[in-house]
Image (cartoon, rainbow, N blue to C red):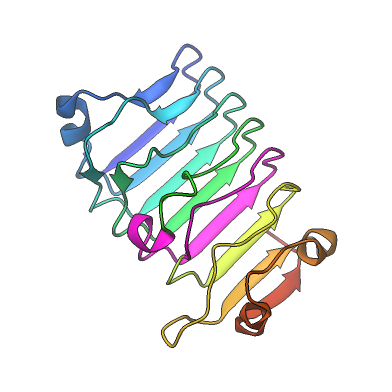
Amino acid sequence: MRECWIQRCDQMESIFTAELEDVSQVLSLEKLWISNLEKLSFLFAGVEKETNFTSLRHIHIDCCPNLVGLFCSTLRFQNLETLQIRFCDKLESVYDRSVPGEEAFPRLHTLRLWELPELKSVCGGILPCIKHLKVKECPKLKALPVGVNDLTPIAIIRGERQWWNNLTWEDEKIKSHLLFRRWGRF
């Protein structure tokens, strides 16, 4: 299975469970689209063993109002390139802050976060390959997982001016590696 689209499954509370058989069957996924799952509270439930989704390149999560946790600390997405999360009213974090972005998403270059009113963090550390970050109506997101080193590309950040002005920075030099643009087309 290379692509999986799950939509309007009203009773589904999690997508993947801790059983190794379930996880191993989806390790070859390249695209995952989750949409309109009213009761979904966790994407991955109870996965305690470190699991690498080396084939997964794109994840899109849309309209899951009860989603609380996205990724547990044992999951890694070594080749994930794009991640889009929209309209998940209860989502507070993509990863726990203890998970460095360098380990979790080493190749993520596009991140879109749209109308996530409770989102406070994406991950710890930085996303080393991030080039495009679009944020809309995520008022509690106060820090971005971007940093500055010789390998860091200049990232384009699109968002609302007020949100941008309220961000906190560990190092003000980071701003010089970012190109901020006011919100436009998503």
Magenta: main secondary structure equals loop
As rendered, which of 9 and 75 lies closer to the eye?
75
Q: Would you place residue 163 above or below residue 23 in this image?
A: below
Horizontal arrangement in the rendering, residue 58 relative to residue 85 (left or right): left
**Quarter of the image that includes the N terminus:** top left
Q: Residue at x 40, y 22 (%)?
A: 14
Image coordinates of residue 161 in percent, x first then y, are: 83, 65
Query: Outermost residue, right direction?
Result: 162
At 74% across and 73% down in the image, what residue appears?
181
Q: Nearer the viewer, residue 119 or 87?
A: 119
Q: Position of residue 87 (x, y in %)?
A: 65, 37
For the record, the magenta segment spans 101-126
The quarter of the picture where the C terminus appears is bottom right
Is residue 130 in the magenta section? no
Q: Is residue 87 left or right of residue 93?
A: right
Q: Is residue 102 magenta?
A: yes
Q: Is residue 154 left or right of residue 23?
A: right
Tell me if residue 71 comes above or below residue 9 in the rendering.
below
**Residue 16 position (above or below residue 117):** above
Residue shown at the point (33%, 36%) measured from the top left: 4
Quarter of the view holding residue 145 = bottom right
Please name the residue shown 41% across and 57% down the image. Answer: 100
Is residue 7 placed above or below 4 in the rendered structure? above
Give the residue at the far top of this rendering: 11
Percent position (x, y) of residue 61? 51, 39
